[in-house]
Amino acid sequence: MKNESDNNALYQRPQPRPTPTSEPFWAGLAAQQIRLQQCDDCAGWVYYPRSHCPHCLSPNLTWQDISGEGTLYSYTVAQQPTAPQFAGEEPQLIGVVELKEGVRLNTVMVNVSPEDLEVGMRVKPVFFQLADTTLLYFEPS
Amino acid sequence: MGLQGKAALVGVADYKNVRKYTGKRKFYLEQWAELTQMALADAGLSKDDIDGICCSSIPESDLFAPATVAEYLGLKVNFAEMVDLGGASSVSMIWRAAAAIELGICEAVVCAAPGIPIPSNPDRGPRDPNRFYGSTSANWGSPQTEFDVPYGNVAQNVGYALIAQRYADAYGYDERALAKIAADQRTNAQGNPKAVFHGQPITIDDVLQSKMVADPLHVLEIVMPCAGGSACIVVSERLARKCKHRPVYVTGCGEHLTTRSVTYAEDMTVSPVGPAAASAFGMAGKEPTDIDVLQAYDCYTITVLLTMEDAGFCGKGEGLSFVNEHSLTFDGTFPVNTHGGQLGAGQAAGMAGGMSQPVEGVRQIMGRADGRQVKDCNTALITGTGGIMSEQSVIILEGA
């Protein structure tokens, strides 16, 4: 898979810009570790990273290492680039994964052909290096 | 509690939708003035009657949009609101206007949604490559910027395709039924000379043979962007009696939203219109079977399908067979988007696409829908949808 860091086109693939709150999540991915926040008060899992738990608004959240196992909740095969920044990557296999902790996240499916994608299929994480950051992709498990 | 049905829509105005606009470019403020003047003339009211405005964002001023509009139009208003609910903004403007009138703080509110290109800015620098489509944030700290965009989940097509794919897994997928929504609405557009696809009917097979954009969405199941714009005027009962046309009362309303990104929706196949419609039906004392025409926000065919199910016109998961069993044309058994909807008439820029549905509902109840008039049309349900099924609003309109 091509690395985007040397792409000199006008439109470069957008990279996440971590915030003070989300930084541990991205640092975790860089170390090939998936970290999710869990609420100390209601035990709810939190994604994306937040200052307060969206289940009970508690500010007491603790980072936990998780396996990243989950299922494909939905997906689409984009035949047209979803933005100019993604030109040349079509078909884009854009997925939404539900982790076994119950939270959902946006991702890209890799190591699978479009016709083999199926809602509900079991997936596992792939750490994808995009220039300075590591994104969380998934592949069939 | 709720609206008492004492505020009425009395005048409407709209531009002809145009795909490749070559006419005079106009600032949104200029369109506000023009559309207001047109809607006042339609109602038989004058500028001095207006004492409220409901707007959405305007490109001329990032902040203070209502004051900018009031000043430009020379209005003195007792109610000024800017609604930021994407495609649901127009429907939400109308119920807020009706509520303000029933509160007694104002008597005539103009709601407008311009969508004609503004003049080219001679001082504009080079395009910022970090910007996305207007609907997608590129700001630091926006969860969308950080957790949607890097994966390519940008703009609208991806989200609606994700919804459709999940729906297919849960309830099955009849692509001919989805395509029929687009085809029936296109038939309706043949009665609307202001539609971009006037003179261009399509069949179900045309839809299915059109380009696949984001599986399972074909290009003919996605709105065509265009130039346009529309406005309406909501007034008190007292003023409604002075107006030229049959008053169209706002008798019920509702609004519901949960997430901006559909990724985090509790169930992707359940749209927020459910609680909004339940509120509107309860307030108006109506049932789905009382509705003569449905004007449902239709950025995609799947939006219409989910809206019909979740608003209660059919059961959950029964939408596809419901579409197959009914004709959605203006003379059919379940008329939907009689102006062609945004799929058939075009989606005017800005927030204007979502104003086309209430404007059409008003025309139908006033009996002024010319070549597409629904017979004995007295009650309409109108929906607006913003973002990726992020927010939905409902109003019920009834003729006096």
Image: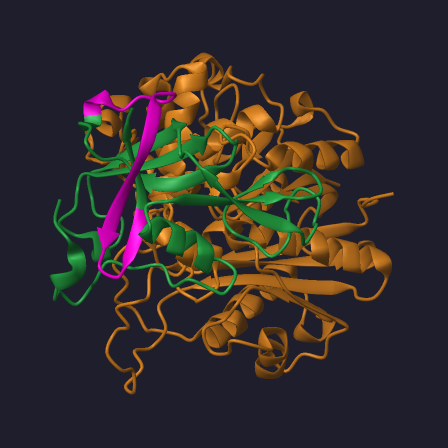
Chain colours: A green, B orange
Q: Is residue B366 left or right of residue B287?
A: left
Residue shown at 43% from the left, 66% from the top: B139
In this picture, is B222 found above or below A118?
below
Residue at image position (66%, 42%) is: A55
User: B22 left or right of A24?
Assistant: left
Q: Is residue B365 left or right of residue B166?
A: right
User: Closest to the observer: B145 or A20?
Assistant: A20
Residue closer to the observer: B346 or B389: B389
- Horizontal side, residue B381 vs residue A11: left or right: right
Residue at image position (22%, 60%) is: A131
Residue B348 visible, this orientation: no
Q: Is residue B273 visible?
A: yes
Please identify the quadrant where the N terminus of chain A is shown.
Answer: top left
The magenta segment = A115-135
Camera-nearest residue between B277 and B328: B277
Count the numbered circles shown.
0
Q: Is residue B49 above or below residue B274?
A: below
Give coordinates of residue B176: x percent, y percent.
Answer: 32, 19
Quadrant (top left, top right, bottom left, bottom right) of the C terminus of chain A? top left
In this rendered view, identify the residue nearer to me: B35 or B68: B68
Please tell me whether residue B63 is drawn above or below residue A70 in the rendered image. Answer: below
Q: Position of residue B253 (x, y in %)?
A: 71, 42
Q: Position of residue B6 (x, y in %)?
A: 81, 49
Residue A122, magenta (yes or no): yes
Q: Is residue A16 above or below residue B306?
A: below
Magenta stretch encompasses residue B365: no
Residue for point 33% across, 34% down: B221
